[in-house]
Amino acid sequence: MEVTNKTATEFVLLGFQELPSFQLGLFFIFLSIYAATLVGNSLSTGLFCLDHHFHSPMFIFLCNMSVLDMSFTSMILPKLLDIFVTGNNVISFNGCITQLFFLVMLMVTEYFILAAMAYDRYVAICLPLRYSHFMSLQVCFLVSFISWSIGVLDSILYTILISSCKFCRSNKIDHLFCDLKPLMMLSCSDTRTIEMVILGPSAVIGFVPSVMTLVSYIYIISTILKINTKDGRLKTFSTCSSHLTVILLFYGTVLGMYMRPKSSYSMDQDKVFAILYAGVIPMLNPLIYSLKNQEVKTALRRIRKQMLC
């Protein structure tokens, strides 16, 4: 449905409509991804929160990550699954703006949580004797609260500005969800001012945690290289390898989605990156932390023994 003379009151998510014969297969694939994401992150959250062995700064941040992963996936995949089954790809204007609000909030929050985790690893490796001073539980809870607050404030700015736009060209969003870029492409309002207003805070919000993460790992790698023995270097690096893996996955997909030049912009590529970011990575994160964290593996073995007994 095209909208030509008034602003849209609803949008149509095109999703994978170019693959009509694969809808059922895609449904089961994404249902499996969604179920695995919820189960894996729920188990991780329960383990980190209920087992007193995990009441430490790093695992507070991991609890935040699990909540972020479950929330982000839950904002996208249920509607996508509904489209596969019923073909109902209509989403209301308010529903679309609400989805955008939560997606921006969760993405910005994840930027800062990942940066906080990088700083935690820096203090643990480079300043181990002062770790308890710099990374107390109170500090971690405060950092988590600030990260979520920044995410909320930034998403409020985004949604207020986007809500003020008029969408009278078309109401068809060639994407899997209501994202900023496709919505701006549909707007018939002058979006140059909005883009400038969004660009400033977004640049700062993206720059600060990115630089914090980069600087932390420069110091971490420098410290690791100074360790005399190979075993010592490997053991020290293993304490941050899972976080570094998640960092590379997160920044790789985000840069692919939002930092490509306009000349190479492709909605098909955006859909691929969206699948990775909204489905595959949240599903893999608990597995990455479990496989590469000795404390988690020890706790899982302990729980398994208790269940067998």
Image (cartoon, rainbow, N blue to C red):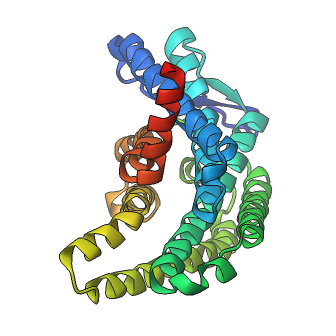
Q: Looking at the image, how many numbered discs can be counted on the residues?
A: 0
Q: Position of residue 192 (x, y in %)?
A: 63, 69
Q: Is residue 304 left or right of residue 261?
A: right
Q: Is residue 183 visible?
A: no
Q: Please state which of residues 24 and 168 is positioned toward the viewer in this rendering.
A: 24
Q: Position of residue 210 (x, y in %)?
A: 50, 75
Residue for point 28% across, 85% down: 227
Q: Please state which of residues 19 and 129 is positioned toward the viewer in this rendering.
A: 129
Q: Is residue 9 visible?
A: yes
Q: Quadrant of the N terminus?
A: top right
Q: Is residue 194 above or below residue 79?
A: below
Residue for point 34% across, 62% down: 263
Q: Is residue 103 left or right of residue 124?
A: right
Q: Position of residue 129 (x, y in %)?
A: 55, 85
Q: Residue furthest left?
A: 230
Q: Position of residue 216 (x, y in %)?
A: 47, 81
